[in-house]
Image (tube, rainbow, N blue to C red):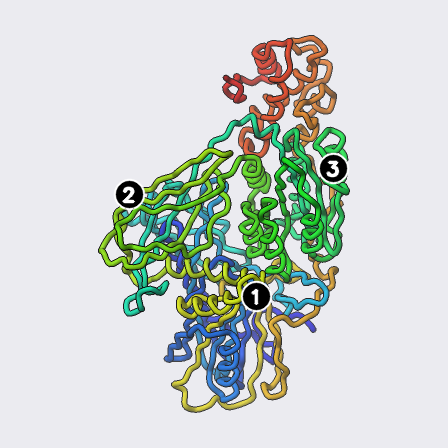
Amino acid sequence: MATTCGLRTLKNEPVPLKSVSVEVGVQGHVASVNSTLQYENQESNPVEAIFIFPMDSNAAVYRFLARIGDVEIEAQVREKEKAKEEYDDAISSGQEAFLLEESDESSDVFRLSVGSLPPGQTASVTVGYVSELAVQADHALRFCLPAVLNPRYTPAGSKSLTAEVPGAQAGDVPYTLSLTMDIYSPSSIQSVESNCPLTPLEFFSQDKTQAKVSLSPGHQFDRDVELLLYYSEPHQPMAILEAGQPGVQSGSLMGDAVAMLSFYPEIKTEKSSHMTSSREFIFLVDRSRSMNRPLRQSSGKQSCMKITRDTLLLLLKSLPLGCYFNIYEFGSHYESFFLESVEYTQTTMQTALKKVKSMKADMGGTEILPPLQNIYSKPCLPSHPRQLFVFTDGLVGNTKEIIDLVQRHAHSHRCFTFGIGEGAHFALVNSMAEGGSGHPQFITGSERMQPKVMQSLQFALQPVGRDIAIKWNIPAGITVNPVSPPVNMLFNLQRVIQYFQLTDQNASNISGSVSLHYTVEDKALENKLSFSMKPKTDGSMLLHRLGARKAIVDLEGKVRAGDDKSARERAVELSIQSGVSSSYTAFIGVNKENKEPVQGPLQRRNIPVGGSHMCNRVMPLPVLCILWCISMCECRGKQEETPWSEPENLDAAAYLPTNAVQDTEEEPEDPMMEVIGLQRADGSWDLQKSLASILGKREEDMAKASPGKSEFSSVWATVLAVLWLHGHKAEFRDEWQFVATKAMTWVRAQSGFDLTKFVAAGNAFLGLQLNLWNLDLQE
């Protein structure tokens, strides 16, 4: 079928999208979003429009509102099969109807059906949802409006989520997006940054805790919209209480008050222990063809594969002595560098480096499940806790099956994930890390992957908090029950959010305290938060819905695991009670005020969402917006029911973007990576011509400048390399900190020389003025 651009009618004429507007309200660490899409049917027959669009997988979708002409329809949550039956009955009888459902396979894909829209009629749909803002490596809070839904590879025999329709050509998006964000912060707002042009930040209070920002006019919605919020006190613990819904029976989640607790535990460790850590590191690397995509749509110079390869080289140099490691690469099949995990030595490191340098995105589709099954089938090494690092653009269809596998092995490992490029599969990347008690990272736009990977490596090397318990000290008579599932592991300065239902809470405010208890290396620790909470009564019910979503996702996992026979029933009940969507329910709205059936044969329009540069198509789209478009004209009475996922698994060759970065092109080497590439596994450098050349010196001059004897040539070379990193690459400190720490740990382990003299000589030779304090070597 030929690809057409934009939204098209049967006559290949564009369907005018009247407007796309998004309103975001941020309260501390929580975002409330309303996204509205308005369009018009200019055809001569009634139409049924099908939208498939991306959504934050952690979002609690709680509102679905449709407007047809002057009629407003507030959709209700129903059990999914019943909602579908009601929708089909309405369409068959000529009534206007709307159906919004979550994918059975992935919680970040939604399908909207708009049925029996009369000729010439205007309509708009609004989706409301609330989500927690993710905390970034630099302590920013990240809000992302998904615009890109890339085609997802589906294993043979499975149904595809996203291959329902082709897409619009790049640059042919026929509409723009307007987005406004109102921010209310518990501490002053320092700045707001974005990958898209913004209007100046406008403050509404002297303490700068209230502000407003918008996308600049005329924004083309051709990529995910990301906003980073910087607060003056991002790690401030807090307790917030929200009153129950008026008129709802006490004892139910919506009828009782709900509290949200936010902690930032500080877990201090010895720096030197990081370099002699007993861990097993397994790196699982996506080599599917989709990894040939450029990291940024606007710049095609570096592919996701090239950036991943460079990051792996840095990781291999940063690993601590005493650890074991292995690398798996996967596509339509998988391979491992070693049959089993091997000890980290100079020989094994060099073998791995050679293989990494030859990695290309040429292994077909994205079948991540088989290598995961192989990894989990191998026994863990005694006294070497397993740390799994997963690098992928995440274009898979069997999301929940993968997540369930990770969760089943959560007791034996930690899983750290990295979603690479625009349109990376948020649900997969985030839920794998959450299920594996690890930490997710996303790399988009102009971001560098290396500092985020180094942060995760630091988490993997640090001791963690376990045996977690939350204890309340509140007035008698109030019962506290957890709503969200318990936390299994704590990381240093990583936010912990939990939700609780408070019954028999009738006071206007509650005073007391709550404590987070945990153990770190058999040492009992406690973080205490005193509060005086006054229930929020604004009617938004945001905390209730966030808590409900957490509980629903937990129940869905129990259903798939088969260990709780009543879990599905409870998930449906909670979804309907809270008005929050689930994979077992759907929103249904029918215009029952229209007494006259819509006349004429019903035409179906499949209008799914966007992806990025796949098969020469760009598929951007707002939280309800349209990216791919084709015309499919079939009378309702003759067409067969279109399943949620139409095609069989896509040919792996289709995943090679026509604008993919050619991996054979020679790119200039980064001097910093060249220096790091010469480091040995033990942390030292040899005095050699290649190192001297990078430092801009001659080898013989470097040897003559040494303040020690020839047997200390490696000490001299190592000091020079570390000084050069500090003096010339200070802005990338987050990337080479482990390399430098390992180097100086090795230097301090040597004897028979004066380190102060070596540093002074190195400063003179390189024209620097650094001291032991700069090198973190002062006792």
Nearer the observer, disc 3 or disc 2?
A: 3
Q: According to the image, label 2 marks what residue?
A: 207
Q: Amino acid at mark 1?
A: Val
Q: Tell me what residue is drawn at x 72 percent, y 39 percent.
A: 341
Q: According to the image, label 3 marks what residue?
A: 352
Q: Position of residue 289 (x, y in %)?
A: 71, 54
Q: Residues within 10 Å of mark 3 (few under 14, many from 20)?
A: some
Q: Amino acid at mark 2?
A: Asp
Separation of marks 2 and 1 at Cα, in angstroms: 41 Å
Q: Secondary structure at mark 1?
A: loop
As displayed, is residue 232 above or below residue 402? Answer: above
| Quadrant in which the N terminus is drawn | bottom right
Nearer-N-terminus badge (1/3): 3
Q: Amino acid at mark 3?
A: Ala
Q: Are marks 1 and 3 in contact (CB under 8 Å)?
A: no
Query: Where is residue 22, by image quadrant?
Result: bottom left
Nearer-N-terminus badge (2/1): 2
**Would you say residue 375 is visible in this rendering?**
yes
Q: Looking at the rendered structure, which numbered label has been put on residue 189?
A: none
Query: Where is residue 738, by image quadrant?
Result: top right
Q: Tell me what residue is drawn at x 41 percent, y 63 percent.
A: 34
As displayed, is residue 17 above or below residue 206? Answer: below
Query: Where is residue 551, by image quadrant?
Result: bottom left
- Who is closer to the viewer here, 333 or 265? 265
Q: Position of residue 48 (x, y in %)?
A: 54, 80
Q: Looking at the rendered structure, which numbered label has been put on residue 609?
A: 1
Q: Position of residue 446 (x, y in %)?
A: 56, 45
